[in-house]
Amino acid sequence: MTLRRKSREFALQMLFQWDMTRQDPKRLEKTFWKSARAEERTRKFADQLFEGAVALAGEIDSLVANLSENWQLERLATVDRGILRLAISELRLGTAPPKVVIDEALELAKKFSSPESPAFLNGVLDAAHKGLQRKSKE
């Protein structure tokens, strides 16, 4: 497993905990890393992804609510919300090519969510990516 994929998994796990507890992100990271083992580079990238997603959570949640027709954000599975927050944050930060970010998000969904999630998440992430592209050209 690549460093970046493992970092995304760790970031998703922290986002899941944060979504459930709304704990201070730095405190959550400190607690999380006491039990999770990873190289320093993996930890750094996971923390960067997690902190970026938390910082943009409100904005991302509004975007997702607009893009997911007939779905309320609260009805999404916590893990799916985390995947969307993580991927859209990474799309905004530009840490990897959009195709890679979306593919990685779908791999997370296949591993941690329901069989139906990848198709739904792909649609939302594709629409989010197109919207972000339009916004950056304006």
Image (tube, grey):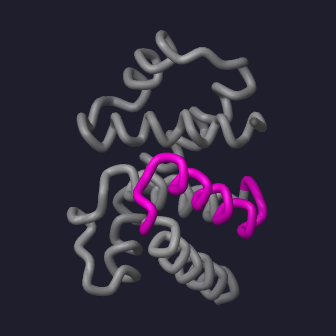
Magenta residues? 95-116
Question: Outermost residue, top direction?
Answer: 34
Residue 112 magenta: yes
x, y (%) of residue 61? 35, 65
Residue lying at 59% horizontally and 58% vertically, measured from the top left: 105
Q: Is residue 68 above or below residue 101?
A: below
Residue lying at 64% horizontally and 25% vertically, measured from the top left: 43
Q: Quadrant of residue 28?
A: top left
- Majority secondary structure of the magenta segment? helix
Instruction: Please indicate whether residue 62 sits to the left or right of residue 106 in the image.
Output: left
| Quadrant housing the N terminus | top right
Task: Decide which of 82, 63 is in the foreground and name it.
Answer: 82
x, y (%) of residue 109? 51, 56
How many marks are shown on the rendered structure?
Answer: 0
Q: Is residue 135 above or below residue 62?
A: below
Residue lying at 61% horizontally and 77% vertically, measured from the top left: 129
Q: Is residue 70 above or below residue 86?
A: below
x, y (%) of residue 56? 45, 56
Residue lying at 45% horizontally and 62% vertically, measured from the top left: 115
Q: Quadrant of residue 132?
A: bottom right
| Quadrant housing the C terminus | bottom right
Task: Decide which of 118, 74 is in the foreground and name it.
Answer: 118
Q: Quadrant of residue 42?
A: top right
Instruction: Please indicate whether residue 28 sits to the left or right of residue 53 in the image.
Output: left
Instruction: Please indicate whether residue 75 sits to the left or right of residue 64 in the image.
Output: left
Residue 91 magenta: no
Task: Decide which of 106, 134 is in the foreground and name it.
Answer: 106
Question: Outermost residue, front direction?
Answer: 115
Q: Is residue 8 above or below residue 44?
A: below
x, y (%) of residue 95? 73, 53
